[in-house]
């Protein structure tokens, strides 16, 4: 019970970003044809608009060489530029890893998506959230239809709603899912992610660090305009902070290249059998939830329809000092991963423009 209190007592999230500009890959004629020059301009615009210190983006398409672009700075004191292979906090994109682990366990028969929370964590949601754990199943945790409210510091806890009625984005859902993974396996969630995903895919820069505060080098400094309870404050460095409160809901660290490998494997069905792959990409509407517009949520991933009508798949992550987006086509052949090292950016607008530039047909 104390672990749950430790997680839910602080659950909060953030936004992100940028500063000056540079392009790390020469813009050949072929690059321009694929829109890399336009993506670079979008990156530069993101920092020019005062969205934050720095931004990076990595594009991969079929068998073409990866393209990497950056604008702004990694360090506001020294002016050091951002670079490839940086480690950064990925926030809520952690949920895609957790969803994958749960679905692998379902494929192995260790649990089912129809199992109730009460089956694995008897009395947990009754005691802490006033909900009925016998009426909430694992599928509802993963697609945020459990009816459980989000936990936001400084606010009174809202009352839970009827399970299955509507989408309510809540970090509590994934904190519970992570605890269930640990009960089902007798191992830590971090070890299960490492064994099942990071090691097989050679994600050497990816981890769930727990209470460890240091980021491996190389990394950009992470900057925030929010304090630990989400209130506005002056820009300050939050690179070395304890994000263990986010845990299964948003505590992971990764790199752009690692997230590309993970997203590609996930979209192509290389991590899950067909039945569980179908479950992961079966979505519910997020309309009316005051969340990311034009999206539908699956089991740890979501789809987003761009203004041009193209739909991309993946997810985003927002935590103090860092914002990450990783989206690709449904076949997993074309993807863009981006990170901003700050949390005061209008991420919907910034990343929306970036993904439109990459995925929408030229007018």
Image: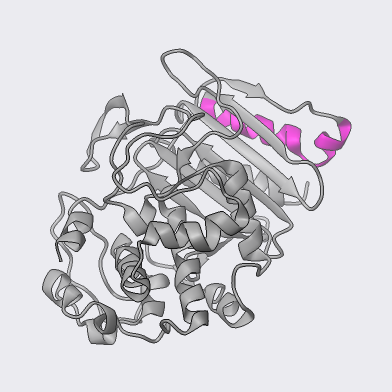
Give 1 or 70, whichever is nearer the viewer. 1
Does the magenta segment cover residue 4?
no
Residue 109, position in %: x, y? 47, 85
Q: Quadrant of residue 4?
A: bottom left
Q: Is residue 72 left or right of residue 114?
A: right
Q: Quadrant of residue 270?
A: bottom right
At 20% from the left and 82% from the top, the residue drawn is 132
Magenta part, dominant SS: helix
Residue 338, position in %: x, y? 57, 41
At 36% from the left and 58% from the top, the residue drawn is 249
At 45% from the left and 20% from the top, the residue drawn is 75
Q: Residue 290, relative to residue 68: is it above or below?
A: below
Looking at this view, name the residue that lies furthest to the right.
29
Residue 19, position in %: x, y? 50, 22
Magenta stretch, residue numbers = 29-47
Q: Residue 52, relative to residue 259: is it above or below?
A: above
């Amino acid at each position: 019970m104390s672990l749950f209190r430790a997680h839910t007592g602080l659950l909060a999230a953030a936004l992100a970003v940028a500063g000056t500009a540079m392009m790390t890959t020469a813009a050949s004629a072929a690059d321009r044809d694929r829109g890399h020059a336009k993506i670079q301009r979008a990156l530069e615009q993101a920092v020019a608009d005062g969205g934050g210190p720095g931004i990076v983006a990595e594009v991969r398409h079929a068998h073409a060489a990866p393209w990497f672009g950056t604008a702004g700075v990694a360090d506001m004191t020294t002016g050091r530029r951002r670079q490839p292979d940086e480690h950064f906090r990925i926030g809520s994109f952690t949920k895609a890893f957790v969803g994958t682990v749960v679905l692998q366990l379902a494929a192995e028969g260790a649990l089912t998506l129809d199992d109730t929370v009460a089956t694995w964590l008897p009395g947990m949601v009754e005691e802490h959230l006033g909900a009925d754990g016998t009426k909430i199943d694992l599928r509802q945790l993963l697609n945020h239809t459990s009816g459980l409210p989000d936990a936001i510091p400084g606010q009174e806890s809202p009352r839970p709603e009827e399970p299955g009625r509507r989408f309510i984005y809540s970090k509590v859902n994934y904190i519970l899912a992570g605890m269930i993974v640990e009960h089902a396996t007798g191992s830590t969630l971090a070890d299960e992610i490492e064994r099942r995903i990071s090691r097989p895919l050679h994600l050497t820069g990816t981890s769930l660090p727990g209470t460890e505060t240091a980021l491996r080098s190389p990394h950009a400094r992470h900057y925030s305009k929010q304090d630990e309870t989400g209130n506005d404050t002056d820009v300050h460095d939050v690179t070395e902070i304890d994000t263990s409160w986010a845990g299964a809901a948003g505590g992971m660290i990764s790199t752009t290249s690692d997230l590309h490998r993970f997203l590609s494997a996930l979209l192509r069905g290389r991590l899950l059998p067909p039945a569980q792959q179908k479950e992961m990409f079966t979505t519910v509407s997020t309309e009316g939830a005051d969340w990311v517009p034009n999206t539908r949520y699956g089991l740890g991933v979501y789809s987003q329809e761009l203004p041009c009508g193209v739909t991309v798949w993946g997810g985003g992550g927002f935590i103090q000092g860092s914002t990450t987006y990783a989206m690709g086509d449904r076949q997993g052949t074309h993807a863009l991963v981006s990170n901003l090292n700050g949390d005061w950016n209008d991420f919907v607008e910034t990343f929306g423009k970036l993904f439109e530039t990459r995925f929408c047909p030229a007018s």
